[in-house]
Amino acid sequence: MTILVVEDDETITRLIAEVLESDLGAEVICFTRAEPALAYLKKTTVLPALLIVDLMLPGLDGETFMLHVREQFGPELPMMVVSAAAPPVARASATRAAAQSFLAKPFELQQLVEEVRSVLWGEPELPARPHLRLIR
């Protein structure tokens, strides 16, 4: 499973990547600007399972990026907004872009993991993996 993160704060990006890789086993692809992330999405043959997008980005802002994504890839690609913008403003942007989730910064990393699980699988717990068996 691949998760694409668009976040201009490199410390936050690194922490998000580390926790999603360790807790969910995800491959995390990170961009600090929206333009190269959009170019990546246009050329990739397999879309990520989830986009995590900051609203306040240099250049193309997060909301405009998400609207481009919706226009080009449709409503099926799950998106999650993380932002330090005032919650009413950020929630409105997330709603306009049809994002499935919003987290206000600062947030706890475990809260992020639970929200990602909820967006991807509809619950905060990891789904059962059919190829794994519990041996007692």
Image (spheres, rainbow, N blue to C red):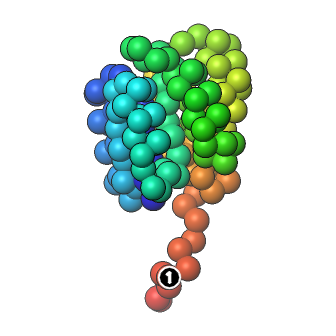
- Identify the image quadrant of residue 23: bottom left
- Which residue: 47% across, 42% down? 42
Q: Residue at x 49, y 30 (%)?
A: 53
Q: Residue 98 appears in which quarter of the rendering?
A: top right
Residue 131 rendering spot, x and y as whole percentages: 50, 82
Q: Nearer the viewer, residue 64 or 4?
A: 64
Q: Residues within 10 Å of mark 1 (few under 14, many from 20)?
A: few
Residue 93: name its quadrant. Answer: top right
Q: Where residue 30 appears, x then y in whole percent?
A: 34, 38
Nearer-the-camera pick, 124 or 56: 56
Nearer-the-camera pick, 26 or 110: 26
- Residue 88 seen in this snapshot: yes
* Front one among 89 and 132: 89
Query: In the shown orientation, is residue 67 left or right of residue 107?
Result: right
The residue indicated by pointer 1 is 131
Whether 24 is drawn above or below 37: the answer is below
**Quadrant of image for the N terminus:** bottom left
**128 relative to 52, above or below:** below
* Left or right of 125, for residue 30: left
Q: Could you tell me which secondary element the residue under label 1 belongs to? A: loop
Q: Amino acid at mark 1?
A: His
Residue 9 place in picture, x, y as percent? 33, 22
- Is residue 32 toward the left or the right of residue 125 in the image? left
Total numbered labels placed on residues in the image? 1
Across and down, in percent, residue 49 comes to: 52, 52
> Visible in this render: residue 110?
no
Residue at 37% over, 47% down: 28
